[in-house]
Image: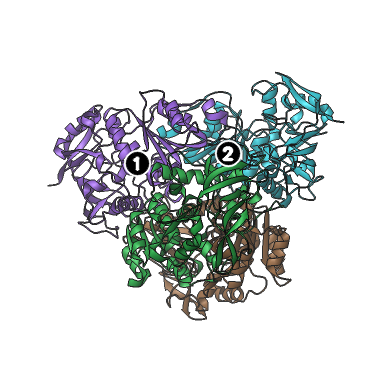
Chain colours: A brown, B cyan, C purple, D green
Amino acid sequence: MNSMKAAVFVEKNRIVLEEKPIPEPGPLDALVRVTTTTICGTDIHILRGEYPVTSGLIIGHEPVGVIERLGSQVQGFFEGQRVIAGAITPSGHSFACLCGCASQDGPHARHGFRAIGGWKFGNTIDGCQAEYVRVPDAMANLCAIPDGLSDEQVLMCPDIMSTGFSGAERGDVRIGDSVAVFALGPIGLCAVAGARLKGAATIIGVDTVAERMSVARRLGATYTVDFQAGDVVEQIMTLTDGRGVDVAIEALGTQGTFESALRVLRPGGRLSSLGVYANDLRIPLEAFAAGLGDYSIVSTLCPGGKERMRRLMAVVDGGAVDLSPLVTHRFRLDEIEAAYDLFAHQRDGVLKVAITP
Amino acid sequence: MNSMKAAVFVEKNRIVLEEKPIPEPGPLDALVRVTTTTICGTDIHILRGEYPVTSGLIIGHEPVGVIERLGSQVQGFFEGQRVIAGAITPSGHSFACLCGCASQDGPHARHGFRAIGGWKFGNTIDGCQAEYVRVPDAMANLCAIPDGLSDEQVLMCPDIMSTGFSGAERGDVRIGDSVAVFALGPIGLCAVAGARLKGAATIIGVDTVAERMSVARRLGATYTVDFQAGDVVEQIMTLTDGRGVDVAIEALGTQGTFESALRVLRPGGRLSSLGVYANDLRIPLEAFAAGLGDYSIVSTLCPGGKERMRRLMAVVDGGAVDLSPLVTHRFRLDEIEAAYDLFAHQRDGVLKVAITP
Amino acid sequence: MNSMKAAVFVEKNRIVLEEKPIPEPGPLDALVRVTTTTICGTDIHILRGEYPVTSGLIIGHEPVGVIERLGSQVQGFFEGQRVIAGAITPSGHSFACLCGCASQDGPHARHGFRAIGGWKFGNTIDGCQAEYVRVPDAMANLCAIPDGLSDEQVLMCPDIMSTGFSGAERGDVRIGDSVAVFALGPIGLCAVAGARLKGAATIIGVDTVAERMSVARRLGATYTVDFQAGDVVEQIMTLTDGRGVDVAIEALGTQGTFESALRVLRPGGRLSSLGVYANDLRIPLEAFAAGLGDYSIVSTLCPGGKERMRRLMAVVDGGAVDLSPLVTHRFRLDEIEAAYDLFAHQRDGVLKVAITP
Amino acid sequence: MNSMKAAVFVEKNRIVLEEKPIPEPGPLDALVRVTTTTICGTDIHILRGEYPVTSGLIIGHEPVGVIERLGSQVQGFFEGQRVIAGAITPSGHSFACLCGCASQDGPHARHGFRAIGGWKFGNTIDGCQAEYVRVPDAMANLCAIPDGLSDEQVLMCPDIMSTGFSGAERGDVRIGDSVAVFALGPIGLCAVAGARLKGAATIIGVDTVAERMSVARRLGATYTVDFQAGDVVEQIMTLTDGRGVDVAIEALGTQGTFESALRVLRPGGRLSSLGVYANDLRIPLEAFAAGLGDYSIVSTLCPGGKERMRRLMAVVDGGAVDLSPLVTHRFRLDEIEAAYDLFAHQRDGVLKVAITP
C-alpha cells in the first residue's frame, strides 16, 4: 500500500500511467490525497518535449484534494481537510517572496531570484496527476476549500484562473477601459473574465473557434473578433472608433498575437503577456512609436500561494465569476492517457478536463 | 426669449423656480440646453442651509443635454451634439489638475490647490436645474453621449456613479477582496456596484431600509446587514469569520458609520470615505491599533472631466452595470419644488429623481 | 554556561539586568549571539507601563549579532555569519504576509491578520537586549551584513531606519514634493532622510531642540521650524507660499502633531502617521474639508523581514544615507540600566545609544 | 522690428540661422522672449534627416525666457515674468491628458490619443532656437522660475531632466534598489541622478567615455562600467553578486543597449526605455524567460506641463540635485551653426550647450 498511480513523463511524446511510491512529507511539507486534477497546456509542451523535464517526473500542477498527513512543523491545518494548492508554490521566505515576486522564488541563497523558480509541481518536483502529491512549504501553500464548493468549482484556481486574472491585474485594467484578449483558450477565457472583474467596459475577444468565442461572450466579452475574417488590427481599430485599446492581453505565445496586441494599443497602453513563447520576439519600430509611445509590456507567471488561492475561491464562492463552462470533459486517472490524447489534439471542443483518481 | 426657468436658492429652506436670463458663454465655455437633470443629496444640504451658497444661485450639478452654442475658442464639439458634463468641472490647466488632483482645482495662481475647487456647478457658479447651463472650460468637460444611450441611462454619470465608483477605486478594491459599504443611498449603492466592478468577492451592504438593501443585492452585494438588527460590527465580523474586511466604504457622513467602518477593517485595511461630514471625526485609539495597524483612511470628491464621463458612459454602454433601478421618480422642471419635497423627505422609496425641462 | 545576561521587564518603572537561560532554537529558529543592540522609544513606553508586556520578558527588538546555532530546518545561512534581523519578524507564510501586510502577521489560522502581530521581539517573545536572542522563522528574517559595514552602521536598520523611511514610502513622496516632518526624534530624523531619498524637493523639519534641528538639516531638511517660535501651521504655510505640503509625516504620536500635519496639507495631500498614540484622535471638520478634500491618512508599523533589511543595508553600503550622527552614546550591556535612565530622560542630547554585550 | 533670428531646418544636414517673423500669440497662447535655450540629441536626428520635420520649421524645444505678451484668454501670468515651458506642451484638456497620458496628447476629437502628440515645439510647430517662441496652451505650460535661479540652472528642466528622471520614475525605482543605466549622455546622466533621487542603493552607469563616467559618479553612480573593457552583462552580474538589477534604464536607443538591459535584470525586474530607436527591437527568448519571468518593459516620452516644470525647478532650488556639470559650452544664437557642429560631432567633451539670443 505504499505505491500509487501517477502520470509520468518518460520521453518525448510519452506520458504514461505508472506505479510510483507514495511520497514522504518532510517537516515543512504536507501529503495531499488528490481528489481532482487537470491537464494544462504546459503539460502538452512537456509531452511534446518543447519544455524539458527529467524523465521519470510525475506531471501536473493543479491539485484539489484532502490532507493525508502533515509534516512535523506544519501548523494551522488538519488531516482530512479539503484543500487546494497553487500551481506555483512559493516558499514564503525567499528574498524573491519578500520582494513581492514570489513566482520567481529563489533558493536559500544570498539574493534569491530564479526565473520561474516558483513553479515546482511537475517541473522540478513530482506533480499531482497522481493519487498523492507532496506539497512543499505547506504553510505557505495549502488553502482550505470553502464549505459548499465542489472540486470542479475550484479546479481552475491553481493555474488557469490565477494566470488569466493576472493578465488583467498586471495590465492594470481600470474601470471603463477597453481591453482586447488575443486567443480564447482556457487562459484567454479567464483573462476575459478577469478583465470584466476589473471593470473593463469593452472587452474584445480574438479567436476563430466559434465555441470559444461563444464562451468568451458568456464570460464578459462585449465583442468577439474572428482573426480569419479580416485583418485583426483593423477590426479592433474599427470597434474602438480608431482609438485602440487601453490594455491588450496576449494569451497564446506567438509573434503574431504579440505583435497584433501591440498594434491595437492606444499610445500609453499596456500589453500584458501571458503566453509561453518558443522564439525570440520582435517589437516593430513604428508600433512602438520608436520608443516614445509610453507603452508598457508586462509578462506574468501564474501567482500562487495560499492567500491567492483563498481570494480566487472567494470569487467563485461569491458568484462574481462562473467558470464551470470551462470543464468540458471528465476522466478517471486510469484514463489519463486518453485525456492527454483528447486535450493535446483539442478534439471535441475540449477546454479543460477534470481527472479524478 | 432670453430668459429661462431655473431652480434658485433663495434662503434656508427655500429653493424656488424662477425666471433667470439665459447665460452667455465665454470663449472657453459652452451653453448647453438641459434635457434631463436630477437632485443630489448635497442639494438638500444646500436647501437646509447646511452647506452655504449665495442667495440667487441656480442649483444642480448633474447635467444631460444638447450643445446650444460653443465659445469662440472651443474645438472638438458641435452644436446640437448630445453631451453630459461632470458635477466637477476641472479646468485641465491648473497646477492641481496637472498634479493628478483635478477635483481640488485651483485658481490661475502660482501653486493652485483650492479645497473642493473643482465643484463649481450649483456651488460657485450657476448650476443645471434650469433650461440652460453654461459649462466652463468646455473642452475639458463636455463629453458626447454614445449613440443608443438614453438620457436616463447616463444621468447617474455626472455625480452618483463617479462618486460611488471612486469609493471602490480609492479604496483600491482588488480581486477577491471583502468590502463593506455603510449606507445604501444612491452613493452607497453605486459604491456597491463599483466594488463589484473592481472584483470584490464579498460585498456587505449596511442599511436598514429593506428596498435599499434589495437594490444593493441586485447591484452586487453578496450580503446585506440591517444595523438595527444587532451590532453592525459584530454582524460583519461574523460574516467574515472574524477576519474583517479589506475595504470599508463610508457613504453617509456620520461619526457612527465612520467609526464602524474603521472597526470592521482587518489590520492593513483601507477606509474609503465618501460622506459629507457635519462634525469633527473621532478615531478611536484601539480601532486604530494606536497608530500601528497599517490602516489607510482616504477621502474622495467626485472625479470629473470628460475622460471620466466617457469611461462611465462606456461602462453603461457595455452593460457591465445597470443603474436603472436608481431612477424611481420623474418630474418636469416645473414640478421641481415637489421633487425637492419628495426627495428631501425620502418619501415613497425615492432613490433618484429625473427632472426634465 | 547556559545562562546569559538580559534586560528584563519586571514591573512598571523597573527594567533590570538579570541572569536568564540561553534560549534553545526550534527547528525553524536561529540562536544569535548579540554583538550590538539599542534602546527604542517603545521600550520606554514599556518601562513606564504605557505599553503592557508580561513581567519577566526580555526587552529589545533591534539585534545585530552572529549566528550561534541554526534550527534543524534552516537553510541558506551558516554559523558564525554576521547578521541582523528586523524589529518585526514576519513568518513569511501567514495570510497577512502573503497579502502584502507582513507587519500585521497572523497566527496559523484560517485568515490570519493580527494587529501588530509581526512585532514579536520584546513584545510577545523574548527580545535582544541580552547576550543571545532566539530569532523565529529564521529563513524569513536573518540577513547577512555586507562586508565592510560595522555593527553601528547597520544598528538603525532593524527599526528606526525601516520605520522612518516607511513614513516617506507610505506617504508616497514623489520627486519634487514638499514634505513636513513633525518631531525630529530618531524616527522623525529617519523620515527626513527617507523623504530626501524619495526625491522630495522641500523638506521642513519641525521640533524645538536645536541639536535635533541641526541633525535634520544634515540629513536633508531644507528648512527647520521651531514650533515654539510661532504657530507651526502658519510658519509652514508661509514657507510653502500658502500652498501647503504634499506629504506630512507625523513622528510623535500626539493630537497636536497629528492635527498640525493635517492642517498643513494641500488638498489631495497625504498624512503619513508613524507615531504611537495614547489617546483617541480627532479629525477637525474643516481641516478635513468635510470629507471632500481627497486627503489620505495612512499609518505604518515598521516593515521587517530579511529583504527589507538587505535593502536598508544596501542603502547604507552605497552611501546614499549616513545615519551615523544618530548614535550619540555607547554603553556595555552591564550598564544598560544607566542607558535606560539617560535615554528615558533624553539627557545630554541623546538620540540613540549603542549597547554592546 | 517684426522679424527675429531663428534656427531653421532647411533640408537634411542643413539647419541655418534665418530671419523669421515674430509669431503672433492666439487667445490661449503666450509669446515668450527666449533668453536661453539648448540643443537636444533629437535635434541632431532632425538635422540628419533621421526624424522628419517640415522644411522651414524653427527647431528647438527647451525654452527659458520672459513673457513678452499673453493671449487674451490667458490668466495667472504677467508680462515680464521669467518662465520656462516643457519640451512637451500638453493642452490639459484632451482625452489623453485627462487619462494621465499627457505626452500622447491628442486632437480635439472624440477619443484623443496621438502617438508623441504632446511634442509640438520644433516638431509640429515652430520651436525655440529663436529670439521668440509662441507657447501653445499657455495656462497649462508656462511655469514661473523661482527667484534666485539662473537661466542655466533651469535649462535642463524642459527636457533632459524631465526625461532622465522619468526613466527612474517609470522604472519604479524603490529605496534599496539596484539600477543599471545604459549610456551616459545627458539623458543617461539625468537618469542616474533620478535613480539616486528615488532611493536606489546601487547605481551602475555604463559607457566608455571616461569624462561621462566621471560625471555619472558625481551625480550618484556607485559604479561605472566600461562596455569596452569586457562583457557588460558579466560585469554587472559580478557587481550584483549574480543577482542582477531591479531596474535597467536604456538611454541610447539601440538593440545592443536594449538587449543588455534585459539581460542584466533579475526576474521580475523592470526595463525602463528612454532611447529613440531607429530599428525594430528583438527580445531574446531566454532573456525574457519565454514570457514567464514577470518582466516589465516600459517606454516613456518626456513628461511636460507646468506642474512638472514646477517640481523639477523645486528640486534644483532645494539643492537635491546639481546638474550644472552638464552645461559644458556656451554660444550666442548667432553662433548656433557652430554649436550644432560641435554638438553633432560630440567634440571637446561636450554634454550640453547653452545658447543665448
Residue under label 2, please give it.
D79
Residue under label 1, please give it.
C220
Disc 2 crowd rating (10 Å Cα; few below 14, some 14-19, many 20+) is few
Q: Amino acid at mark 1?
A: Gly
Closer to us: C72 or D11:
D11
| Front position among marks 1 and 2 | 2
Where residue B312 appears, as percent x and y from the top left, is: 68, 46
Closer to us: C179 or D189:
D189
Where residue A39 appears, as percent x and y from the top left, is: 55, 69
Q: Amino acid at mark 2?
A: Glu
Name the image quarter holding the C terminus of chain C. top left
Cα separation between marks 1 and 2: 36 Å
- Left or right of C324 in this view: D131: right
Residue at the location (46% across, 76% down)?
A52
Where residue D293 appears, as percent x and y from the top left, is: 47, 64
Is C186 placed above or below A150 here?
Answer: above
